[in-house]
Amino acid sequence: MTGTDGVLRWGVLATGGIAATFTEDLRALPDAEVVAVASRTRASAEAFAERFRIPRAHGDWASLAADEEVDVVYVATPHSAHREAAALCLEAGKHVLCEKAFTLNAREAEELVGLARERGLFLMEGMWMYLNPVIRRMTELVRDGAVGEIRTVQADFGLAGPFGPGHRLRDPALGGGALLDLGVYPVSFAHLLLGEPDRVQADALLSPEGVDLNTAMLLGWSEAGASALLNCSIVADTPLTAAVTGTRGRIDFPRGFFYPERFVLHREGREPEEFTAGAADGTGPGLRGMQFEQAEVARALRAGETESPLVPLDGSLAVMRTLDAVRDRIGVRYPADGIG
């Protein structure tokens, strides 16, 4: 599905900061453009459209979903609205890229995946970290045995805030807390390397509202003999680093592991090897890295694929199951869970 000129036509659903970053990065692709934007209010949609010179602004989500000039929709709402917004678009026959965390819980994620597969439509979680060329190079090296068999994974993502009681990150109804906003990165990083764990332990500091302020996770893979120590926080500025240690080596990511520009491979008997992103990787000034997931969506749609092999839907479902398990261990419940 593209316009008559071969350009993939995007609709952006929501007008927050991540929607702005997405729209800015899309300019790096020569065969894609944002043709419509939607918000719950027309004023917000029109302001966003004016800012980015988008032809059409819709004052409700349904109008964007029904827009015949839109090929694919990027859902940029808070994750508490992902299921509703993505389902609306899928039911209208639109392909969807849905920002992470995919949904509030695994049940909602299963509903979206089932709907997309039933309709034969493309659906992908916006886990842009997976499409980063440096992350992809790391996974290739690990797959080729550069560090041997993985034994440990470490990763953290924490911000100091402060985020007051009125902030969305403190609101259970909006899926608040560190886990879904920030912890999804370390958890997804571990899943990328080892798949779904069979053991999940966690401990957390909870806010008066009942969301996690600081969470530590220990995941285990019995068959692989591996474990992952992961942290996330909205009350502490953590190092934002990651490391993968195997039986024959180690890979270290500096601060900003979720959007890295480099990593260092350590192997016994060799000098450390640094791998960096280059101009050929499509990086550039002013770009945040969302162009890589945008390019993958375009590639998949033009190939007639309904999901990406690099961000598979079964993988997104597995991550949501792990996040659910962590919340179960630390006692965080959202109204949408329908339990507790």
Image: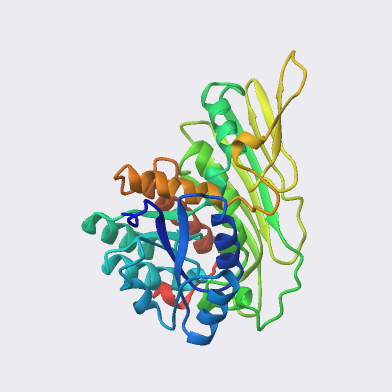
Mark yes or no: residue 179 visible.
no
Please determine whether, in this image, residue 115 is positioned above or below residue 130: below
User: Please, which residue is most extreme toward the top here?
Assistant: 269
Please determine whether, in this image, residue 81 is positioned above or below residue 148: below
Whole-percent x, y for residue 109 in the image: 38, 61
Q: Nearer the viewer, residue 327 or 307?
A: 307
User: Please, which residue is most extreme toward the left here?
Assistant: 118
Which colouring convention does the figure follow? rainbow
Q: Quadrant of residue 71?
A: bottom left
Please determine whether, in this image, residue 152 is positioned above or below residue 214: above
Whole-percent x, y for residue 77 in the image: 50, 71
Q: Nearer the viewer, residue 115 or 195?
A: 115
Residue under the point 31% across and 54% down? 1
Residue under the point 37% across and 51% down? 6
Mark yes or no: residue 4 visible.
yes
- The answer to whether residue 308 is left or right of residue 148 is left
